[in-house]
Amino acid sequence: MHELFFHPDVGNEIKASYAWYQKQAAGLGDDFLAELESAY
Protein backbone atom coordinates (compact mmCIF):
# COMPACT_ATOMS: atom_id res chain seq x y z
CA MET A 1 0.00 0.00 0.00
CA HIS A 2 1.26 3.47 -0.84
CA GLU A 3 1.54 6.18 1.75
CA LEU A 4 -0.36 9.39 1.05
CA PHE A 5 1.11 12.81 1.65
CA PHE A 6 -1.01 15.94 1.62
CA HIS A 7 -0.18 19.60 1.27
CA PRO A 8 -0.28 21.30 4.69
CA ASP A 9 -3.28 23.40 3.61
CA VAL A 10 -5.44 20.31 3.16
CA GLY A 11 -6.14 20.09 6.90
CA ASN A 12 -7.48 23.64 6.93
CA GLU A 13 -9.63 22.96 3.87
CA ILE A 14 -11.12 19.87 5.46
CA LYS A 15 -11.92 21.75 8.68
CA ALA A 16 -13.56 24.58 6.73
CA SER A 17 -15.56 22.12 4.62
CA TYR A 18 -16.66 20.21 7.71
CA ALA A 19 -17.89 23.44 9.34
CA TRP A 20 -19.75 24.45 6.17
CA TYR A 21 -21.50 21.07 5.89
CA GLN A 22 -22.44 21.15 9.57
CA LYS A 23 -24.09 24.54 9.02
CA GLN A 24 -26.17 23.07 6.19
CA ALA A 25 -27.56 20.22 8.30
CA ALA A 26 -26.65 18.60 11.61
CA GLY A 27 -24.48 15.55 11.03
CA LEU A 28 -23.69 16.38 7.42
CA GLY A 29 -20.12 17.29 8.36
CA ASP A 30 -19.69 13.85 9.89
CA ASP A 31 -20.97 12.30 6.68
CA PHE A 32 -18.41 14.38 4.77
CA LEU A 33 -15.56 13.08 6.95
CA ALA A 34 -16.78 9.51 6.59
CA GLU A 35 -16.75 9.85 2.81
CA LEU A 36 -13.21 11.25 2.89
CA GLU A 37 -12.03 8.35 5.03
CA SER A 38 -13.74 5.90 2.70
CA ALA A 39 -12.07 7.45 -0.34
CA TYR A 40 -8.60 7.34 1.18
Image (tube, helix red, strand yellow):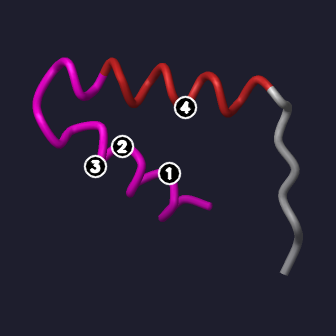
- Residue of label 1: 36
| Three-letter amino acid code of the residue under disc 1 | Leu
33 falls in the magenta region: yes
Q: Position of residue 8 (x, y in %)?
A: 83, 30
Label 3 CA crowd tier, 10 Å (few <14, some 14–19, many 20+): some
Q: Position of residue 2 (x, y in %)?
A: 88, 72
N-terminal-most mark, 3 or 4: 4
The part of the chain drawn in magenta is: 21-40
Residue 32's disc number: 2
N-terminal-most mark, 4 or 2: 4
- Is 2 displayed left or right of 27 in the figure? right
- Residue of label 3: 31
The residue most toward the bottom is 1
- Is 5 displayed left or right of 15 in the figure? right
- The span from disc 1 to disc 4 (Cα, nearest Å) is 9 Å
| Quadrant assignment for the C terminus | bottom right
CB of mark 1 within 8 Å of CB of mark 3? no
- Residue of label 4: 14
Q: At 11% across and 35% down in the image, what residue appears?
A: 26
